[in-house]
Image: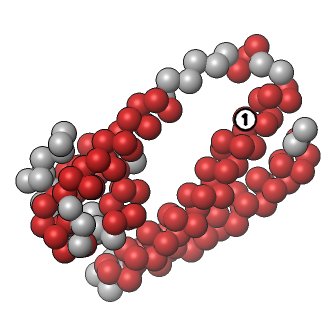
Amino acid sequence: MAHSTESTVGELVAEGIHRARVFETYGIDYCCGGKTTLAEACRKAGCTPDEVAAALDAADQDTAQAGSDTTDWRATSLTKLTTHIVQTHHAFMKRELPRIADLLAKVRNAHGENHPELADLAQVYGALRAGSRRISRRRSRCYSP
């Protein structure tokens, strides 16, 4: 296992934000519970450190491979470029915007009493999310092959 069971979940996420999804999958709190060791977090979540470490390793590997795209987009057809944008970036936004909204709601519920600025952040994020959806839909209709 490449990940020490004595590392905190907060440290593991700080080393690679993509690991947050793994912890979310297992119901492990890396925000308020960020100082909890991997071993303790797994015990609380009812899973094994080996199971979570394997998922973390897979996420690390997927992230490393995703960064190896060497496509020269300048030499790619407009159709291929447009398809890539819609399938990759629009899909990413469609998947991640709701996830971020959920995370923001959790942080606001946990810390909003001491951080009233989170209400402003939620309002700004809501406007950003709505605008991004409108733009994404419009571009998908206009430019889809």
Residue 84 in view, yes or no? yes
**Amino acid carrying mark 1 in the image:** His
Q: Observer-nearest residue: 131 or 144?
A: 144
Q: Residue at x 37, y 42 (%)?
A: 58
Q: Is residue 29 above or below residue 74?
A: below
Q: Position of residue 92 (x, y in %)?
A: 61, 50
Residue 35 in view in this figure: no
Residue 61, horizontal then vertical, whole percent: 38, 35
Q: Secondary structure at mark 1?
A: helix
> Circle 1 sits on which residue?
84
Quadrant housing residue 28: bottom left
> Are there few (<14), some (14-19), or many (20+) residues within 10 Å of tag 1?
some
Is residue 55 found left or right of 8 in the rendered image? Answer: right
Residue at (24% x, 49% y) in the render:
53
Identified at 25% across, 72% down, the residue is: 45
Direction bottom: furthest residue: 113
Left or right of 114? Residue 95 is right
Q: Position of residue 134 (x, y in %)?
A: 78, 60
- Foreground residue, 62 or 18? 62
